[in-house]
């Protein structure tokens, strides 16, 4: 295992002070959130879901003492400081609003997509600000170890000026059943990881051009299946995000070659790696720099993974914001910009053209479609 070269792929846990109430008992909560919280030592006080039976099963597994019949009952528990919501996006906004109205609840962690529309996301941002509460959004790919290490390499200037960045996904997601009721699929539920990661790494893009075609495997109706988005950034950086959710035929006896690869080329170096989610392995990073590695490739390694370890950082940043008074790393105000980027991608598909982010409003009066 090579030395980390000063990189820190996982965040330090600074705060464990707040009682957490969990809403939702599906895979992401049972396998990721609660596994991460157990490892980090975050106190989980209660859980509720759409059915008490499912909540009870997850509570037994993770030794959560309080199980409520409904999410509303959990939100009324005065011992809860932070509410962690993992619920379908059409039902999430009403739970967020109810949580914001509870005087004892100090912070809310919501799933992405925050809402089904940019308009709803903007309203939630403004309502959280008016309530004086922290609303944070679970953009957990920012806490993937390779993304965090790459961010540090970029900030150190090892690669020089970024020229071209690519994220190439060839993997078949498990589409949750509730997605069948929506017309939006890949961009809102998978590409949102990659588009947000590009914002995290490089700042705000100027424009996006997205094309799509139907995924032959997905039987329910959907606007976007396989998607390819090209983003341009100030300074000339070009980035491509591809979500191949088809990835070829699959079935018994067919070898799988699922992967997510990324690469960043700069004026002084190159970094590349993988996201380990498709096969459950740690993500990877390799990089070379003319200025810091004498043009030789280095391969820092770690044992932690995107799922579940990234969820430690997601919950920790919210707790630290509450404790310190500093803004959360994953603020709702920042996430609205990711929702706006997704909205711009859908507009690009619908109108078959490049869409400038200046066309997409994130002001309170989003109906006007004039940039704030």
Image: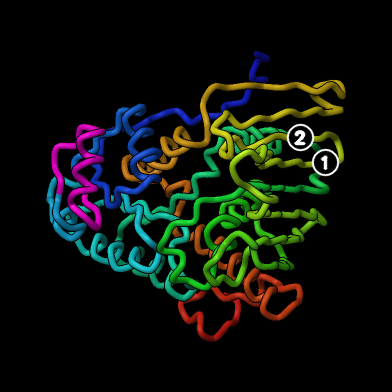
**Is 101 rendered above or below residue 243?**
below
Asked if the stretch drawn in magenta spans residue 48, the answer is yes
Of badges 2 and 1, the one in the foreground is: 2
Judging depth in this view, the residue of 328 and 306 nearest the camera is 306
Q: Quadrant of residue 125?
A: bottom left
Does the rendering let one see residue 337?
A: no
Residue 368: horizontal and vertical position, in percent? 54, 86
> Which residue is found at the position 54% from the left and 33% from the top?
280
Q: Quadrant of residue 360?
A: bottom right
Q: Which residue is mark 2?
A: 271
Judging depth in this view, the residue of 51 and 310 nearest the camera is 51
User: Which quadrant does the N terminus fall into?
Assistant: top right
- CB under 8 Å between callouts 2 and 1? yes
In this picture, residue 211 sits left or right of residue 280: right
- Is the residue marked by circle 1 packed among few (<14), some (14-19), or many (20+) residues within 10 Å? some
> Which residue is found at the position 35% from the left and 44% from the top?
29
Q: Which mark is residue 266?
A: 1
Distance between the alpha carbons at the discs numbered 2 and 1: 8 Å
**Is 277 rendered above or below residue 54?**
above
**Is 263 rendered above or below residue 192?**
above
Residue 4: horizontal and vertical position, in percent? 64, 19
SS class, disc 1: strand
Residue 275: horizontal and vertical position, in percent? 62, 38
| Among numbered discs 2 and 1, the one appearing first in the sequence | 1
User: Which quadrant does the C terminus fall into?
Assistant: bottom right
Residue 50: horizontal and vertical position, in percent? 24, 58
SS class, disc 2: strand
Per the rendered image, the range of residues in magenta is: 47-67
> Which residue is found at the position 52% from the left and 36% from the top?
306
Q: Which mark is residue 363?
A: none
């Amino acid at each position: 295992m090579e030395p980390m070269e000063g990189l820190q792929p996982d965040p330090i846990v600074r705060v464990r002070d707040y009682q957490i109430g969990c809403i939702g008992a599906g895979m992401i909560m049972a396998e990721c959130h609660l596994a991460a919280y157990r490892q980090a030592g975050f106190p989980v006080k209660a859980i509720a879901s759409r059915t008490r039976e499912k909540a009870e099963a997850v509570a037994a597994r993770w030794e959560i003492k309080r199980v409520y019949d409904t999410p509303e009952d959990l939100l009324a528990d005065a011992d809860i400081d932070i509410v962690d919501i993992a619920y379908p996006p059409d039902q999430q906004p009403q739970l967020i609003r109810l949580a914001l109205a509870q005087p004892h609840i100090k912070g809310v962690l919501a799933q992405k997509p925050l809402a089904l529309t940019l308009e709803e996301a903007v309203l939630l941002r403004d309502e959280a600000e008016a309530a004086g509460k922290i609303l944070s959004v679970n953009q957990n790919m920012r806490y993937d170890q390779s993304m965090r290490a790459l961010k540090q390499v970029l900030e150190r200037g090892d690669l020089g000026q970024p020229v071209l960045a690519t994220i190439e996904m060839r993997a078949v997601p498990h589409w949750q059943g509730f997605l069948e009721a929506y017309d939006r699929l890949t961009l809102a539920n998978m590409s949102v990881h990659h588009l947000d990661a590009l914002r995290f790494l490089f700042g705000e893009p100027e424009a996006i051009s997205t094309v799509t075609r139907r995924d032959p495997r997905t039987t329910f109706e959907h606007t976007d299946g396989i998607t390819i988005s090209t983003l341009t950034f100030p300074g000339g950086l070009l980035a491509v995000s591809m979500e191949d959710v088809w990835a070829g035929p699959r079935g018994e006896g067919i070898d799988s070659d699922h992967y997510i690869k990324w690469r960043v080329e700069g004026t002084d170096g190159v970094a590349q790696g993988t996201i380990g989610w498709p096969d459950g392995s740690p993500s990877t990073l390799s990089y070379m720099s003319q200025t810091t590695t004498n043009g030789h490739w280095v391969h820092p390694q770690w044992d932690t993974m995107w799922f579940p370890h990234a969820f430690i950082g997601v919950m920790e940043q919210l707790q630290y914001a509450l404790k310190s008074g500093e803004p959360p790393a994953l603020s709702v105000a920042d996430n609205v910009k990711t929702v706006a980027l997704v909205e711009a991608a859908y507009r690009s598909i619908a109108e078959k053209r490049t869409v400038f982010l200046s066309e997409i409003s994130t002001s309170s009066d989003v109906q006007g479609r004039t940039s704030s």
